[in-house]
Image: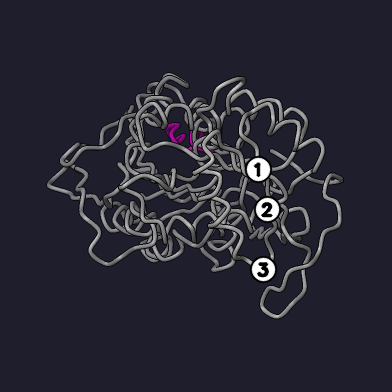
Amino acid sequence: MCSTSGLIPESAPGTVNGTLERRIRILVTDDSAFMRRAIARMLEGEDDFEIVATAASGEEAVKKARELAPDVITMDVEMPGIGGLEAIKQLTAERNAPIIMVSALTREGAEITLRGLELGAIDFILKPDSAYVDIVKLRRELVDKVRTFGRRPAQIITPMRPRARPVRASFGCVMMGASTGGPIALARIVSRLPGDFPIPIIIVQHMPPGFTKPLADRLASAGPLDVVEGTDGMALVPYRAILAPAGVHLRLHRSGDRVVIVLEEDELGALHVPSIDVTAASVAEVFEAAALAIILTGMGQDGVAGLRVVKERGGYVIGQDAETSVVYGMPRAAAAAGLVDRVAGIDEIPELLRSFARPKPG
C-alpha cells in the first residue's frame, strides 16, 4: 500500500466545515493538455485542495513527485514514453503518494487499469471526456477519493473488532462485497480457493460498466476456481464464482432446488450499481441461515442494510480488518452496526472459507 508518511511538507491551510486544515497537494498527470485542465478544474474549487503541478508524461510525473512530494497523484495510464504503468511501478516502489488512475472506457482501458491496480495504484476514475460519463457524479467521486487518500496519513482509524461468534450452520452460498481496493483483495482470496470449492460464490465489486468482464477473466486466471461474469438466468453451482456485472443489480431467485441470478435495472437511484445491499439481502432471503456474507475493503456504507437482512435471517458475516483494508470504510460501518460475526485479515479469509466447506465430523 502506498504511504506518504514523512513525505508531506507543510502547506497553506484550507477551510473544511469551518475548520482550518492543511491543503491536500495534488499532482495531475496526463499527456493531453485538455485533460490536465479538465481534471484540475474538477479539483481546484475545493478549499482544502491545491494543484501543486501538472505533468505531461510518466517521466515528468516521477520527477515532479520526487521534487514536490504531493499527497495524491492522478495518472493517465496511456501515455508515450515510460507510460502510466511504468510510472506507477516506480512511484509505488519509492513509496510515493497514492495514485488515482484516469482510465478510458474501453476493454483495453479496463485491462490496463486492472494492471495498474496490481502494480500499486490505489483506485481509478473514468476519463471525463467520455460521452458516457456523468461529469457531476465523476467530479464528486474524484473529490471524495482525493480527500480520502490525501488525508489518510493523518487519520486515526479505530478498528472495530467484535468478539468472534462461532459458526453454527453449513453454508449454501458465499456473497463477497468490495469497493476501493477490492480487485486485489478478491484476487488474494479467489486465487487461494481450490477449483473444487463446493459452495457457490457471488461477488459484487463497485465498478463502471465494461470493467467487470476483464476483472472476472483476471480472477479466473489467478487460480483454479472458475470465475465468470454473471448473465441473467445463470444458475448458482458449486466450483464457480459469479461476478455481478456493472450497471445492473444482481438478485437471486429459487425455483425448487435450483437458484439462478436475476439482473435488474436500477429504479431507485442507488449510489452503487450493482449494490452490495441489494445482493446481500437477496442472498439472505434465498439461503437464510445458510448465507455467508463477507464485506471487504471500500469507501462508504454499502452493505450495511443488506448485511442486516443476513443477520435477521440467521446468516453469518465476516468483515475484513483495518490493517489489510485499502479503505476501512464498509467493513467498519458493518462492524459499528453490530453486523460482523468475525473480523479477519485478507489472507485469513481463504482459510476460513476452506474450513467452512469441509464436511463436519460425526
Q: Is residue 326 above or below residue 44?
A: above
Taking the image as shown, residue 229 lies to the left or right of residue 150, namely left
Question: Disc count in the image?
Answer: 3
Residue underneath mark 3: 47
**Amino acid type, callout 1:** Thr
Residue underneath mark 2: 51
Check if residue 357 falls in the magenta segment: yes
Q: Which residues are magenta?
A: 352-362
Residue nearest the observer in this picture, 129 or 196: 129
Report the residue at 18% width, 50% height from top.
Answer: 253
Q: Quadrant of the N terminus?
A: top right
Asked if labels 2 and 1 touch by Cβ distance under 8 angstroms, the answer is yes
**Amino acid type, callout 3:** Asp
Taking the image as shown, residue 241 lies to the left or right of residue 46, namely left
Name the spot of residue 232 as percent of width and height, x first.
Answer: 17, 41
Q: Residue furthest left?
A: 255
Residue nearest the observer in this picture, 306 or 265: 265
Report the residue at 28% width, 58% height from top.
Answer: 285
Mark 3 and mark 2: span between their CA atoms?
A: 11 Å
Residue underneath mark 1: 54
Q: Quadrant of the C terminus?
A: top left
Q: Residue furthest bottom?
A: 18
Check if residue 281 falls in the magenta segment: no
| Nearer to us: label 3 or label 1 | 1
